Amino acid sequence: MLSAAHDILTKEESKNAVLLADILPTLIIKFIAPVFIHKVPYGPVLFLQFLEMFKKRSEGFRRASCDQRLLCGSLTVFPACPRNVLEGWGSGTGGAGVAGALLYSGLIQAGLPPPGDRAGHAGGPGFHAHQVRGELAAPHTADRVGSAASDSGAFEQGLLKFMGPLALVYFAEYFINQGLLELLFFPNFSLSHADQYRWYQTIYQFGVFASRSSLHCVKIRRVWILTLLQVVNAVFLLLAVKFQFLPSAWLLFVIIFYEGLLGGAAYVNTFHFISKETESRHREFAMAASSVGDSFGIALAALAAFFVHQYFCSL
């Protein structure tokens, strides 16, 4: 969806409008999902997801976001399953992002006209569900989630050490993706402005996929280091937009891939260590509640990117 933002909106519209329309329903659902989502069956959610294809522009974005997050929110019951499910979930979500972005960018590059708000979206949630659906069924999930939600005050302060860095790293990377990358255009490059934007988003997804798939090999406890590096990325690219000192799109491709590596690593390591360090009776609620962090950061990034985009376009 975000890869298609440049094709969907006009030149005068900021592309973070797509991000904002996508993330606000996500944020609302993640706030309330931990106390009821375990009772929602998969079937109706998937059916609504396919109906979404026929919606238009921002209305379609909001509906797509609600349906997809209902599905993804129901998959936050990792502790009821083997530990390797978390590794599979991280890799699967990363792979879905790569598949959608690569398919969309590849088809447009091959000459297919941009298909509007239906681009590259309908397959994602089905991919997620197929990968982990069978593994995440647990008979006592409802009891554990409800119990953890009722006495969550004892450990909510501990969650902030995970939620804070996660929110900040997502703020930085989505501020880059939707606020800055559109403004980094290389006119002498072989790709057009729209093509460059699409491949920026695709390369970012490759970085996310690589790092989300690395949990089995590399575990990073100090997630704040990843957050700091991502903030440095955002500041560097903000200066690059202001002063236009990047010599080549190829260098920017490398930076974007690195940005994806940092974001994916922060995501999967945050949930890994929440799973490891939280008591079993609180764990499911902690996993679901902590997922608010990334959505909150993305929502703030969309708002900040709007004003930054307006500022640079007015110069």
Image: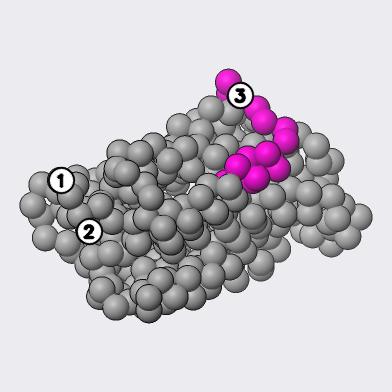
Disc 2 is placed on an element classified as: helix
CB atoms of marks 3 and 2 within 8 Å = no
- The image quarter containing residue 229 is top right
CA separation, marks 1 and 3? 37 Å
Answer with mark 3 or mark 2, whichever residue precedes in sequence.
Answer: 2
**Visible residue check, residue 111:** yes
CA separation, marks 1 and 2? 12 Å
Report which residue position mark 2 lands on.
194
CB atoms of marks 1 and 3 within 8 Å = no
Q: Vertically, is 226 above or below 4?
A: above
Q: Is residue 108 magenta?
A: no
Stretch of the chain drawn in magenta: 216-230
- Mark 1, mark 3: which one is toward the viewer? 1
CA separation, marks 3 and 2? 35 Å
Disc 1 is placed on an element classified as: loop
Q: Vertically, is 186 above or below 132?
A: below
**Visible residue check, residue 253:** no
The circle on residue 218 is 3
Colour mapping used in the image: one colour
What x and y, as percent, mark residue 23?
50, 66
**Residue type at mark 3?**
Val
Within-10-Å neighbours for mark 3: few <14, some 14–19, many 20+: few
| Residue 43 shown left or right of residue 194 in the figure | right
The circle on residue 190 is 1
- The image quarter containing residue 283 is top right
> Residue, x 23% and y 49% (percent of image)?
105
> Residue, x 36% and y 68% (percent of image)?
15
Q: Residue furthest top?
A: 217
What x and y, as percent, mark residue 20?
47, 71
